[in-house]
Image: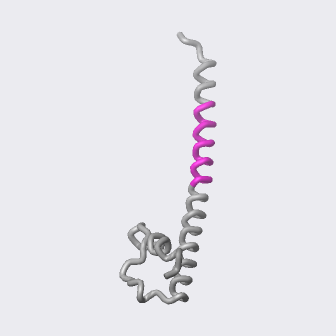
């Protein structure tokens, strides 16, 4: 058995959001299939990482816009007289 096969079995992506090779038995995995699943897993994880990077950038842009409005609001409140 390939030394990375246990990790491969825990990292393959499924539609439920969990990682694991559902419905496959160890006897069904040829060296080609195991490499194919490993590459598919790596590609899936890379796509998820890219999506998360895009979401992170969008979140920072929204936070920056919100802080601009908050600073303007605070500066307007400070310039107003109390009475």
The residue lying at 58 percent from left, 63 percent from top is 49
Q: Residue furthest left?
A: 23
Of the pair 48 and 25, the residue shown nearer to us: 25
How many marks the image carries: the answer is 0
* Residue 40 percent location from the top left of the image: 54, 78
Q: Which quadrant of the figure has residue 18? A: bottom left
Q: Where 57 falls versus 34 (above or below)?
A: above
Picture residue at 62% right of the left edge, 48% below the top: 61
> Magenta segment: does it hold 64?
yes
Colour option used:
one colour
Residue range corresponding to the magenta coloring: 56-71
- Position of residue 48 relative to residue 41, above or below, is above
Taken as a whole, is the magenta stretch helix, strand or loop?
helix
Q: Is residue 52 above or below residue 71?
A: below
The residue most toward the top is 83
- Residue 52 is drawn in which quadrant? bottom right
> Toward which corner of the image does residue 17 lie, by quadrant?
bottom left
In the rendered image, residue 50, in percent from the top left (x then y), is placed at 60, 64
Point out residue 82 in the picture as x, y percentages from the top left corner: 55, 12
Near-viewer residue (12 or 7) = 7
Q: Is 1 inside the magenta-drawn segment?
A: no
Q: Is 5 located above or below residue 64 in the figure?
A: below
Residue placed at 58% from the left, 22% from the top? 77
Name the residue located 58 percent from the left edge and 46 percent from the top edge: 62
49 or 58: which is nearer to us?
Answer: 49
Q: Position of residue 13 (x, y in %)?
A: 46, 72
């Amino acid at each position: 058995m390939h030394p990375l096969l246990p990790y491969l079995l825990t990292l393959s992506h499924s539609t439920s959001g969990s990682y694991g090779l559902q419905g496959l038995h160890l006897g069904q995995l040829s060296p080609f299939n195991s490499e194919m699943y490993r590459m598919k897993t790596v590609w899936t994880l890379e796509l998820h990482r890219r999506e998360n990077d895009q979401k992170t950038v969008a979140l920072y842009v929204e936070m920056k816009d919100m802080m601009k409005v908050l600073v303007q609001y605070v500066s307007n409140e400070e310039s107003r007289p109390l009475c």
